[in-house]
Image (cartoon, coloured by chain):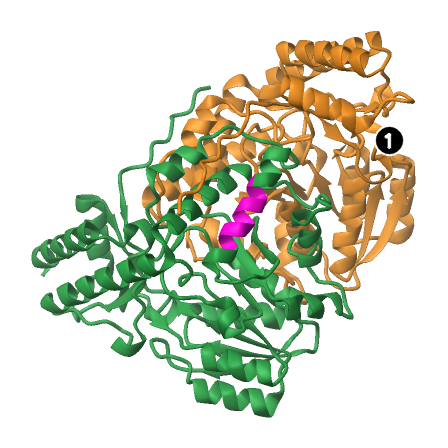
Chain colours: A orange, B green
Amino acid sequence: MTTKPFHPPSRLLMGPGPSDVSPRVLQALASPMLGHLDPEFLRLMDAIQFQLRQVFQTENMLTLALPGTGSSGMEACVVNLLEPGDKVIVGVAGYFGERLAEVATRAGAKVVRIEAPWGEIVPEAAVIEAIRTESPAVVAMVHAETSTGVWQPVDRIALAARAAGALTVLDAVTSLGTIEVPVDEWGIDAAYSCSQKGLACPPGLSPVTFSERAVVAMAARRTPVSSVYLDMQKLARYWGPERVYHHTAPCSLFYALYEGLSIVLEEGLAARFARHRAHHAQLVTGLEHLGLRLLAPPAHQLPTLHAVRIPDGVDDLAVRRALLNDHGIEIGGGLGPLKGKIWRVGLMGEGSNTNHVLLLLAALRSVLDRLS
Amino acid sequence: MTTKPFHPPSRLLMGPGPSDVSPRVLQALASPMLGHLDPEFLRLMDAIQFQLRQVFQTENMLTLALPGTGSSGMEACVVNLLEPGDKVIVGVAGYFGERLAEVATRAGAKVVRIEAPWGEIVPEAAVIEAIRTESPAVVAMVHAETSTGVWQPVDRIALAARAAGALTVLDAVTSLGTIEVPVDEWGIDAAYSCSQKGLACPPGLSPVTFSERAVVAMAARRTPVSSVYLDMQKLARYWGPERVYHHTAPCSLFYALYEGLSIVLEEGLAARFARHRAHHAQLVTGLEHLGLRLLAPPAHQLPTLHAVRIPDGVDDLAVRRALLNDHGIEIGGGLGPLKGKIWRVGLMGEGSNTNHVLLLLAALRSVLDRLS
């Protein structure tokens, strides 16, 4: 029996991720396997930790890449820092805030939701007030809500949490590598991200970082972490000098992550953030010319991901299908209550460039003209 | 800042995995990214399910690849099939049996351990007797114990479990693709494996399969699964016709898995198993000539992984270091109580070939001569 080889069609990835990756990263992926305890591979892991600390702007020792997608990072932060009965404040204004609340509920935590409509920020004042009145163990916020394109301010919340003795967890899945995520400066105790958006690597790894306060809290747990796979104390012993076996590291993805992070650091964080802002501005101007409006208020719009309101009478699926089939351009649809109401346009990592913006705008105009 | 590119050194991977992969698989890895909801990618997922069913010898609808290593598959099977207070029988005669027991304990299950010394099989009669007396909800066995090289008989245990109304979970991490794992014929209700051993793909994915009985049991749960990331009901909705978002599939690893499974099925399972048996026999004869003995009794020795007793007075690390540095050959060390007492030699997937065996034997002879 012979199976047909799979050759992915040519695509411009302008949805919520994965984003396009550099040929350097693709080439790294194709390097031969290495044993996960090979001295050369251990050196690569050390180098990745060094790189991730720079990207997270932290000196946290416990900074590494989990063997799973960004969702595994969310779960790792929640299940390691919360014990059954602990109180957690979760900011919910989109799909990923909802998911944080669900993961915390399953961990047996008492979840206090501070909500806002999808497309708005969670009001900082309400979260800070809840920190005062609820005395939570953990405060968990989504920095860049991938379902709405909203850029959530979190620095004052983290400050209030620290003052109240609570740990702050930050979902940086769609922010890391595209906007500032200064973990140490803000006093974030645990942050997680993914490999396939702002870092422009293939999906499958979740960079995470934990502060010393978080490490102390995990060491003082009264109950074991429900997950062995995501148990940070076991993962710390694997990534630390003892190298105690925990799982078989996905070496190919690590090669790619190292190369992708090298590209990020060669560009420099400040230049990378400026590039994301510039192409965001270009996109917004172009969308305005097409008469299209964004869901998020301008003051809280991410430069990374844009939720574009679908005009009345326009068929969501027909437009996305035409973009994909006629132009090879992928944009995302809406999740949950926003299904059919928005498109999601990502400008992430390698994908945040002027030609992507120009081509998308031109193709969108052409498709909308044809379908109207 | 410019970072040094990483070029993995040339290695013959003859440890417990990852194993060597075909250049076809490496090439597939380097294909460009695709969105996880791209129609072409969804077709690839369907094709992978079709391939995995053949490899697991099952018609189970719920057969897919989890976005994590083999350890995530173990955790998925345990946390989805067990609820707090449920009784589970676990066969423990090595590191991975121990881990199964630990994962089940953390899931809140009442764990009944049926044990044997590391290097022996768990006595089938003792497990079958315990099934009668304990009436467990689940019986969990390690088919191929990666820490000892022992091939555990499980067919009669699965039969007894089914007769008693218990679900059988099988750890097929080191067996799938190298020896028979006839899931339907044996009446296994959940099995998990990894991508980087017998399937000769890069690490990072965990093929799993669940029987209809298991699906019914999961639907009838009284409590939610502790893990959202590994919640099989959510994963089933993502892999099913609805394609409800759950995580971003690691597309590069999927390209590689598809290509690797194509190679497995082109060879054919029967031929592949025969090849593993033949090179196993060649290795065993060669080891005997070197005066080296295996830990496992011959009747229960896997053809995939060999625990070789380190002779008295021979320095474990010095030998492995010389093999790696002078010959580019990786073999594994012992885990837990077998640390320093055994080497682990894998003949898995692409790596089960006569030249690997000949070279390892020659290099081992040379190193032992030099170091003695």
Main SS of the magenta segment? helix
Q: Amino acid at mark 1?
A: Gly
Residue B334: image quadrant is bottom left
Residue B130 visible in the displayed image: yes
Give the percent coordinates (x, y) of residue A121.
Answer: 86, 32
Indicate left or right for A89 with B187 as reference. Answer: right
Q: Which residues are magenta?
A: B44-52
Viewer-proximal residue among B95 and A289: A289
Determine which residue is flagged by label 1. Answer: A119
Viewer-proximal residue among A254 and A167: A254
Residue A66 visible in the displayed image: no
Q: Residue at horizontal 85%, vertical 23%?
A: A309
Give the percent coordinates (x, y) of residue A316.
Answer: 81, 27
Residue A295: image quadrant is top right
Say if A184 sits above or below A42 in the image.
above
In the rendered image, the residue lying farthest to the front is A1
